[in-house]
């Protein structure tokens, strides 16, 4: 039900933006639809591959290993391993969220998956090497990483409290 509500809200926002574009200029609305079509065609295969990969990955992951390393009894070590795995996972949301969903299906605890996704969002190594360090002084990147280190553990802890 929540997903349906968010979907309706996003549809309303998109409709409002389309209306605003049309009011400014019908040509702007046409250009917007053209850009949206291009992005949709570009993203659809990646999304399909991610969903299919997640489904297969969930069945290929060894359940005993996932339970031992990331299961409900993995504790602080499971959170740390999930955080490192998140930092080492390359790719965008299709990859990161697909791996998180597959781990849940294979028996990983929600707290460890929250730590994984949080670390993936904050610390992806390839993004730091490709984008952050070339764009900003390394000292700033290091400071951002150090300040962000507690967040995967905090996310796991809050997950344990609220479920």
Image (cartoon, helix red, strand yellow):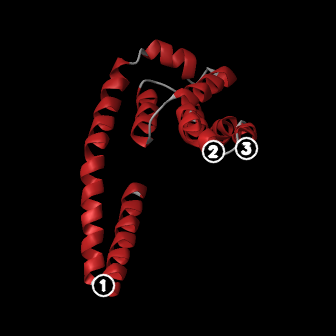
Viewed as shown, does residue 11 lie left or right of 141?
left
* Mark earlier in primary sequence (1, 2): 1
Q: Tell me which numbered mark, 3 or 1, is placed earlier along the sequence.
A: 1
Nearer-the-camera pick, 85 or 136:
136
**Up/down of 2 relative to 142, above or below:** below
Relative to 43, say whether 51 is above or below: above
Real-space Cα separation, disc 3 to disc 1, in angstroms: 43 Å
* Tag 3 and tag 1, C-beta contact below 8 Å: no
Sooner in the amino-acid sequence: mark 2 or mark 3: 3
Q: Is residue 20 left or right of residue 156?
A: left
- In the current view of this chain or complex, which residue is farthest to the bottom? 23
Q: To which residue does mark 1 refer?
A: 25
Q: Secondary structure at mark 3?
A: helix
Q: Position of residue 51 (x, y in %)?
A: 31, 37
Q: Nearer the viewer, residue 146 or 151?
A: 146
Residue 17 position in % (x across, y down): 37, 75
Q: CA distance from mark 2 to mark 3?
A: 33 Å
Residue 139: x and y, percent?
75, 40
In depth, the one of 83 and 58 nearer the eye is 83
Q: Residue 64: x, y in percent?
A: 47, 13
Residue 162's disc is: 2
Q: Quadrant of residue 37?
A: bottom left
């Amino acid at each position: 039900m929540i997903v349906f509500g968010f979907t309706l809200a996003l549809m309303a926002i998109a409709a409002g933006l389309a209306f605003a574009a049309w009011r400014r200029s019908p040509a702007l609305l046409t250009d917007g639809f053209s850009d949206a079509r291009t992005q949709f065609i570009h993203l659809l295969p990646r999304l399909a591959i991610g969903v299919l990969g997640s489904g297969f990955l969930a069945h290929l992951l060894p359940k005993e290993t996932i339970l031992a390393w990331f299961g409900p009894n993995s504790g602080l070590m499971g959170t740390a391993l999930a955080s490192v795995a998140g930092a080492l996972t390359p790719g965008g949301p299709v990859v990161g969220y697909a791996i998180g969903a597959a781990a849940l299906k294979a028996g990983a605890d929600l707290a460890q998956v929250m730590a994984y996704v949080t670390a993936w969002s904050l610390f992806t190594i390839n993004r730091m090497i490709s984008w952050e360090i070339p764009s900003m002084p390394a000292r700033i990147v290091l400071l951002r990483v150090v300040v962000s280190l507690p967040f995967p553990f905090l996310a796991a802890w809050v997950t344990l409290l609220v479920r």
